[in-house]
Amino acid sequence: MTHVTIVASPPNASADEVCQTWSDESACAALASALAQALRQRLDSGGSAVIELHGTLGAGKTTFTRHLLRALGVTGRIKSPSYAVVEPHELPGHTVQHFDFYRFNDPQEWEDAGFRDLFAAPGLKLVEWPDKAAGLLPRPDLRLMLTLHDDTRRDARLEALSPIGRAALAALKAAPTEGGPAHA
């Protein structure tokens, strides 16, 4: 059993964030599962949320996304949308769109692919490499920043940027984690 603690934010950090250090993939999975629970009611009632995932290559963006999708109920193979740019996942009550803009180079692609319509529709949007589509994306509700230290250890900072994000973060902070209650 992995002990996951949501640690106190740095003194200069916003009250609207949660920070963790992941020593292994199970810690990533635990945060993804807790976040899925925090978002479930909103998504199941037809709401929307946008989560940006930031970090270098290998930081764990896609791994976190896979764990989040599994916790939300996605079964079967979960492909990275690196070449397709977007992979849709249909779940009872909502849709999840997983975007990867790593290879995104031309803003005209945004219009041609109908991304504006996808972001306007209800459901969860998970966005890897959002900086590649800067100026085209809506303001995210949550931003996950991942910093890679070695093959297993990562720092994760989840920041709320909207009322939707703050509600999800509050639910996340209130939820117990394995080994005890969450801390913020």
Image: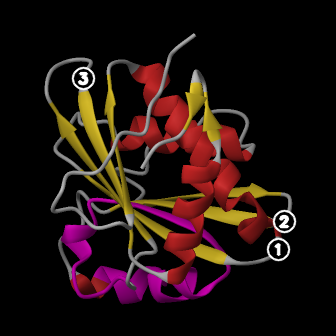
- The mark nearer the N terminus, 1 or 3, is 1
Q: Residues within 10 Å of mark 3 (few under 14, many from 20)?
A: some
Identify the residue position indicated by label 2 in the image. Answer: 93
Image location (x, y in percent) of residue 158: 37, 55
Left or right of 44, for residue 23: left
Q: Which residues are magenta?
A: 109-137
Left or right of 114, for residue 144: left
- The mark nearer the N terminus, 2 or 3, is 2
The three-letter amino acid code for the residue at tag 3 is Arg
**For numbered disc 3, what is the local secondary structure?**
loop
The three-letter amino acid code for the residue at tag 1 is Ser
**Disc number placed over residue 45 in the picture, else none:** 1
Residue closer to the observer: 46 or 161: 161
Identify the residue position indicated by label 3 in the image. Answer: 153
Residue 75 vertical position relative to residue 101 in the rendered view, above or below: above
The three-letter amino acid code for the residue at tag 2 is Gly
Q: Are marks 2 and 1 in contact (CB under 8 Å)?
A: yes
Residue closer to the observer: 33 or 167: 167
Q: Residue at x 52, y 31 (%)?
A: 29
Q: Residue at x 45, y 39 (%)?
A: 64
Residue 132 shown in magenta: yes
Image location (x, y in percent) of residue 119: 52, 81
Q: CA distance from mark 1 to mark 3?
A: 36 Å
Image location (x, y in percent) of residue 71: 67, 40
Q: Residue at x 65, y 56 (%)?
A: 38
Q: CA distance from mark 2 to mark 3?
A: 35 Å
> In the rendered view, how is the structure colored?
secondary structure
Of all residues, the one furthest to the top in this rendering is 1
**For numbered disc 2, what is the local secondary structure?**
loop
Tag in front: 2 or 1: 1
